[in-house]
Image (spheres, helix red, strand yellow):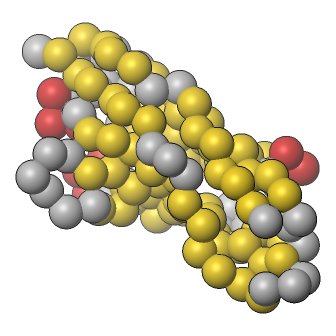
């Protein structure tokens, strides 16, 4: 059994910063890619950024240069540093990870989501 627990969301003014964290726990054999997605009201969930186990990163065009994804493999944790936040970044942010556990193989797991609200 695997859990992803997110933290760090909140309310911030435009131009401000927030740092999201997501820790994976449970009977984990290995973690492959980890990433952050977001879903704004009335919109589809979209990829924000992801990172491979080797550290290769990928970003949505809308956040390039403002957001930075990183991970600590020893802690099974992924981070999202969000700078220069804009009102259009307001959404529920979800952590996702591609995790291998011995009894069930490799599957995608999701966190419960954390609200990020950027006021203008």
Q: Is residue 93 left or right of residue 72?
A: left
Identify which residue is drawn at 36% across, 32% down. Answer: 115
Q: In the rendered view, would you say 17 is above or below 7?
A: above
Quadrant into which the N terminus falls: bottom right
Q: Quadrant of residue 82?
A: top left
Q: In the rendered view, would you say 102 is above or below 65?
A: below
Image position, residue 100 (x, y; %): 78, 78
Image position, residue 108 (x, y; %): 59, 74
Q: Is residue 84 left or right of residue 43?
A: right
Q: Is residue 54 visible?
A: no
Quadrant into which the C terminus falls: top left
Q: Is residue 72 left or right of residue 14?
A: right
Q: Is residue 93 visible?
A: yes
Q: Quadrant of residue 33?
A: bottom right
Image position, residue 27 (x, y; %): 89, 65
Identify which residue is drawn at 26% across, 17% down. Answer: 15
Identify which residue is drawn at 72% across, 84% down. Answer: 106
Image position, residue 91 (x, y; %): 26, 39
């Amino acid at each position: 059994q695997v859990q992803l627990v997110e933290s760090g969301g909140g309310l911030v003014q435009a131009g401000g910063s927030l740092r999201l964290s997501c820790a994976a726990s449970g009977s984990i054999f290995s973690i492959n890619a980890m990433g952050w997605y977001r879903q704004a009201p009335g919109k589809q969930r979209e990829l924000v950024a992801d990172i491979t186990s080797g550290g290769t990163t990928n970003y949505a065009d809308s956040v390039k240069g403002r957001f930075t994804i990183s991970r600590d493999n020893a802690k099974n944790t992924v981070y999202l540093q969000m700078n220069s936040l804009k009102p259009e970044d307001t959404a529920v942010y979800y952590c996702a990870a591609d995790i291998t556990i011995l009894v069930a193989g490799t599957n995608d797991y999701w966190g419960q989501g954390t609200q990020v609200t950027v006021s203008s």
